[in-house]
Amino acid sequence: MKIKKAVIPAAGLGTRMLPITKSMPKEMLPIVDRPVIHYVVEEAIRAGIDDILIITGKGKRAIEDYFDRSFELEYYLRERGKLRELKQVKEIGEMVDIYYVRQKRPLGLGDAILHAEKHVNGEPFAVLLGDDIIIAKKPAIGQLMKVAEEKNTPVIGVEKIPWEKVNRYGIVKAKEIEEGLYRVEDLVEKPLPREAPSNIAIIGRYILPPEIFDALRETPPGKDGEIQLTDALRLLLKDRSLLAKEVEGKRYDVGDKVGFIIANVELGLLREDIRKRILEYLKRLNREN
Ligand code: UTP
């Protein structure tokens, strides 16, 4: 199962981050000095993907502008000799081939993915959600692509989470077949801790087969009238096997207010140019509290 294309659904309303998301896509919120979606696109590129489809929607034009060339800005920077900034800005416009399709109504992640059907054209594909930024030596989606290729089976990224948080995630019932690799037996969306089959949570990375589109069409709207990807994966399980791989790396849930702030601090600490100043500030804050 060779993966060449990635889909990034970015049409959600981002209600957990209101009110900022009233007029700004959550995918454009800054982590240090670049938007969330920049990290996600970079992860796909590092994994060798060179064709990315972003599912956008109402109020999401800033995403297209970000990845577009900006000749006016480039001219301005060149004229003023700001060559480092110029290089950075140009590189973003040349990162990769990015295509866009609009989801007209936010009817859920499953419905968003259905909009990718024409573009992926019958091939298996990668899905990366912008809610999770994963910092890893080997790009998280690349770790899944490797498994999908070796086992010729679709695979979803998972992480063991504290039991008290299972009601915020899709959870898998699964059998470990190799260290960190599971055969999925069932999936449940946001179970109560006492009803959860495990604490193995689905994170926002998937390698899906084209059969997912039929499964999505057969999936009735669930909670809030939205078509849930987890429900479609359950349908898919009836006909074929599905693997789950524990992703190695550090994950930041940037669709959540606290997760977003933690990501800014920790990713800031990874930047050589500002690391020292942030550390000094954190030490002072610690002393004062
Ligand atoms: P979430 O479940 O996090 O929904 O979507 P959301 O609306 O973005 O955020 P909250 O929970 O209200 O704060 C997971 C992913 O699916 C996309 C989102 O953009 C996000 O990347 N999505 C969700 C769509 O593309 N369309 C939808 O209709 C819903």
Image: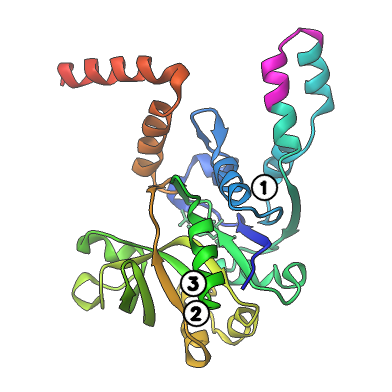
Residue 137 is inside the magenta segment? no
Residue type marked 3: Val
- Dominant SS in magenta: helix
The quarter of the displayed image where residue 1 is located = bottom right
CB under 8 Å between discs 2 and 1? no
Tag 2's secondary structure?
helix
| Distance between the alpha carbons at the discs numbered 2 and 1 | 29 Å
Q: Nearer the viewer, mark 3 or mark 1?
A: 3
Q: Is mark 1 within 8 Å of ligand 1?
A: no
Give x and y (percent) for residue 51. Answer: 72, 56
Residue found 72% across the figure and 59% down from its top: 102
Residue 188 visible somewhere in the drawing:
no
Q: Marks 2 and 3, Cα distance to the nearest angstrom?
A: 11 Å
Image point (64%, 60%), residue name? 7
Q: Is residue 152 above or below residue 128?
A: below
> Which range of residues does the magenta coloring cover?
79-88
Q: Secondary structure at mark 1?
A: loop
Amino acid type, residue under disc 2 in the picture: Leu
The disc at residue 59 is 1
Tell me the CA gap for discs 3 and 1. Answer: 32 Å
Mark 2, residues whose alpha carbon is within 10 Å: few (<14), some, or many (≥20)? many
Q: Which mark is residue 233?
A: 2
| Pointer 2 or 1: first along the chain | 1
**Residue at horizontal 45%, vertical 74%?**
223
Front one among 94 and 231: 94
Tell me the residue that label 3 is attached to: 155
